[in-house]
């Protein structure tokens, strides 16, 4: 019928390999995101309710 018959044993292995590759790619992407966030400098603007109250009075 079909020339592409996949044995259950081989099909499962291919799926596991594909999922493992996707997992590795996702992990590398998340690590790169984390590194880029760490290299940024701290925010120098004033925060908090005191600043918000001053801005509303002006």
Image (cartoon, helix red, strand yellow):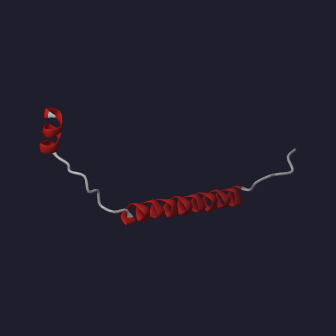
Q: Is residue 11 left or right of residue 43?
A: right
**Place of residue 23 in the rendered image (x, y in percent of width and height, measured from the top left):** 53, 59
**Place of residue 40 in the rendered image (x, y in percent of width and height, measured from the top left):** 37, 62
Query: What count of labels does the image hold?
Result: 0
- Foreground of the two, 5 or 14: 14
Residue 1 placement: quadrant: top right
Q: Is residue 25 left or right of residue 41?
A: right
Residue shown at the point (14%, 42%) measured from the top left: 49
Q: Is residue 24 left or right of residue 38?
A: right
Residue 22 placement: quadrant: bottom right
Relative to 14, say whether 50 is above or below: above
Residue shown at the point (16%, 46%) measured from the top left: 48
Residue 33 placement: quadrant: bottom left
**Place of residue 45 in the rendered image (x, y in percent of width and height, measured from the top left):** 25, 52
- Foreground of the two, 26 or 11: 26
**Place of residue 29 in the rendered image (x, y in percent of width and height, measured from the top left):** 51, 60
Relative to 14, say whether 52 is above or below: above
Residue furthest top in the image: 57
- Foreground of the two, 34 or 3: 34
Relative to 49, say whether 6 is above or below: below
Residue shown at the point (20%, 48%) measured from the top left: 47
- Foreground of the two, 36 or 19: 36
Which quadrant of the figure contains the C terminus? Answer: top left
């Amino acid at each position: 019928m079909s020339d592409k018959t996949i044995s259950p044993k081989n099909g499962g292995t291919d799926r596991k390999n594909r999922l493992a590759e996707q997992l590795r790619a996702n992990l590398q992407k998340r690590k790169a995101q984390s590194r880029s966030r760490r290299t940024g400098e701290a925010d120098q603007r004033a925060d908090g309710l005191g600043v918000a109250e001053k801005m509303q009075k002006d």
